[in-house]
Amino acid sequence: MTDARKRIVGWMMFDWASQPFYTLLLTFVFGPYFAAIATNAFMSGGLAETVADARAQSMWSLGQTVTGLLIAFTAPILGAFADTTGRRMRYIYAFSVLYVLGTAALWWTYPDGSTIWIALLAFGIGMVGAEFALVFVNALLPSLGGSATDDSDIGRISGSGYALGYAGGVVSLFIMLLLFAESEGGTTLIGIAPLFGFDPAMREGTRFVGPFTAIWFMVFMIPFFLWVRDDSPPAPGGSFSKAMQELGASLRSVLRRRSLASYLASSMLYRDALNALYGFGGVYATLVLDWSITMVGIFGIIGAITAAIFTWIGGRADGRYGPKPVILFTVWVLIAVCIVIVGMSRADFFGVPLAEGSALPDITFYILGAAIGAAGGALQAASRTMMVRHTDPARPTEAFGLYALSGKATAFLAPAMIGIVTYLSESARIGLSPVIVLFIIALFLLRWVHPNGERDATWHANSPSLA
């Protein structure tokens, strides 16, 4: 391979290496496990099951809210400083260490619920590492295409990277379900005891998801660190004060840039809603449908497979038609998915009672999982491409820091709204309804986003500001 090709492949390997955090920890294995043991802990304290379910979901949302706020208000600052100094790789190294330490520590999430607060802290540390590393990795994307003005390469690379990541999610989830994560009967999906002599009674097979995620990341980040380098040499005279001045100027300019401001606001809401679906989908299945970890895992495999396939297809569509049509279509799909989720329970489907033991909720949720994977993966890849179309090539990390800010500034919003509605309604199902509102508002804001971003200088020069 040429050095340029190696750099692209190495860059895409970050998606493969980091995806298990979202697939295994946030959504399909650790999240449901945390919800189950937290519910049991609350029930042992005397709460009814429905109230305990709601408290467990609220606790999970609290952890993500606090972590999201921390990321939101520090990512643009670090991004601006990295652009000013011309160094990004050292930040990727540093946050990779946090990722590994936080995820590995999840091993100590004991099934009696005695360490749930420690587990929430460890998960937050791992999430900080994952999200900050992603900011600096994304900042390298504009330099990977063949041309500074032709974004078709960027769309394909972004889509292929996400598709590779979801494929990694499928493989890692298969390994966990087949060899480690135990069912209520103490065996894995293929009917064997968890490997390495892990004790099913202590849920050691399921708890191994933390160290497994850390090991996976360390192994598959090797190509990234071997083949990827900063796209520019260190800049002389870079300083923190200079970085803050340039960041301030960038923030002030946002309201004068209609397409960018509208895109950041829209993506802020739909990414928040999507992350809520990822973060609470497995929890919903556990609390509302009473699924086991194994059933949630199968749900995850279906979603990850459709994500890998349709993210790749979405990348091709992005390269041909641009990212905006992909974003619009996928948001509509996710709105439909959310409406069905809120209208369904184990006992009824949109108010129509179901026979006891009906398989309709299970079959429907498997289909919804496939749709979430397909639409969510394509949406994330197209969103990354759209941000490139609004990025100053000289300051990509700052731009993606602002992108992270828009994605995390209201990262507390969906979890907090879900937590509040869940708490007030005492229903984990009704608690997901605010996600629909966020998607609809995001869809409305997209009307002011130009398909070419700010690469069309004539349009940008003549466009009115939001100020």
Image: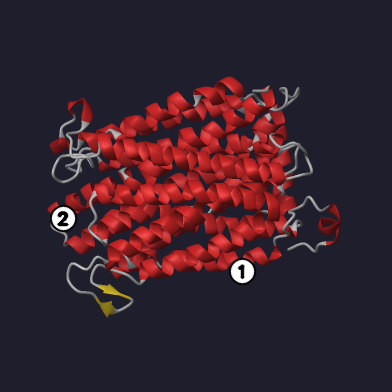
Dot 2, how many residues are within 10 Å of its Cα: few (below 14), some (14-19), or many (20+)?
Answer: some
Residue 290's tag is none
Horizontally, residue 420 falls left or right of residue 1, namely left
Q: What element carries label 1?
A: helix
Horizontally, residue 460 falls left or right of residue 138, namely right
Measure how far apart labels 1 and 2 are at the Cα level: 42 Å
Image coordinates of residue 224 in percent, x first then y, are 55, 26
Q: Residue furthest top?
A: 226
Q: Is residue 145 above or below residue 442?
A: above
Specify which label sits upstream in the sequence, 1 or 2: 2
Position of the C terminus by quadrant: bottom right
- Snapshot colouring: secondary structure
| Residue closer to the observer: 205 or 101 | 205
Image coordinates of residue 399 in percent, x first then y, are 67, 43
| Residue closer to the observer: 55 or 297 | 297
* Residue found at x 39% / y 37%: 171
* Residue found at x 69% / y 52%: 320
Image coordinates of residue 402 in percent, x first then y, are 63, 46
Position of the N terminus by quadrant: top right
- Three-letter residue code for mark 1: Phe
Quadrant in the picture for residue 365: bottom left
Horizontally, residue 432 falls left or right of residue 426, namely right
Q: Can residue 401 be seen in this view?
A: yes
Q: In this view, does 367 lie above or below 389?
A: below
Horizontally, residue 11 falls left or right of residue 348, namely right
Which residue bears the numbered disc 2? 43
Q: Can residue 129 be seen in this view?
A: no
- Three-letter residue code for mark 2: Met
Which residue bears the numbered disc 1? 444
